[in-house]
Amino acid sequence: MSGIQESVVIRTVVRIMVPFIEIFALYVIMHGASGPGGGFQGGVIFGAGIILFTMIYGIKEGKQRMSNKLSRILSSTGLSIYAGTGLLCMVFGGMFLQYNVVPLLSLDPANVSKILIDVVEIGIGITVLVIMISLFFDISPSEEDELQLSEEEEQ
Amino acid sequence: MIWILDFTMLLFLVVCAIAAISIKDLLSAVIILSAYSLVMAIVWVEMQSVDVGFTEAAVGAGITTVLFIATLARTEGRSED
């Protein structure tokens, strides 16, 4: 544990900041169709919020919230949402991701497009956020490595 | 397009790029690269491509820096050459 992780100021600020970062990430994902942003950027921001939490509160706390099993399930779920929406359009006789052919609740085709674009963005967002977090977990040194390093330094 | 702003930022980008490859301390190089990304994001927004600028700020200045620093934590953090 370094000095940064024990600082009360940083721990409190991170605890307050992380929910706002996540809310902003959800906003970016949901407004991807009408403005700048989208699934990828929102997913990266959401992942950055959790990575910030993990950096300060330790990798163990982070892994409790995002275990390997959960990240495997979530990343494949996001991919399935994306591919499934694309294939659903092919089932109804359109091309891959051609939204306006889907007869969803007998809505206007333009509105169906808007809804399905949001669904696809959510799928992309889930996959990107989980992959970013698992990249960080794989690269960052684990708690045992840190202990070993400090023991080696003492010797 | 404000050409003097563009010119200043592009000049800053070149200075950052040269500093990032010539500095010995790798942690400093990573921080300089992150400053490079942030200015690059402003340049993208200035050139009317907000989406690319958004991605540059989130990925280039955010995640890449974190991943580089996490890598440096497992290595020596100094360049040999």
Image (cartoon, coloured by chain):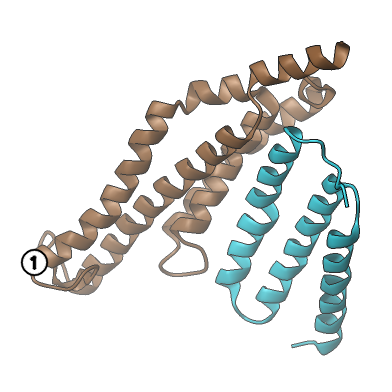
Image quadrant where residue B20 sits: bottom right
- Residue B72, percent from left and from top: 75, 39
Q: Label 1: which residue?
A: A92
User: How many numbered marks are there?
Assistant: 1
- Residue A76, percent from left and from top: 32, 42
- Residue B77, percent from left and from top: 82, 40
The reply, left or right, for residue B24 in relation to residue A148 is right
Is residue A36 in view? Answer: yes
Residue type indicated by callout 1: Phe
Image quadrant where residue A112 sits: bottom left
Instruction: Please state, as top left, top right, bottom left or bottom right, where the C terminus of chain A lies in the image.
Output: top right
The reply, left or right, for residue A132 in relation to residue A73 is right
For chain A, give the colour: brown
Chain identifier of the cyan chain:
B
Q: Chain of mark 1?
A: A
Whether residue A81 is situated above or below residue B47 in the rendered picture: above
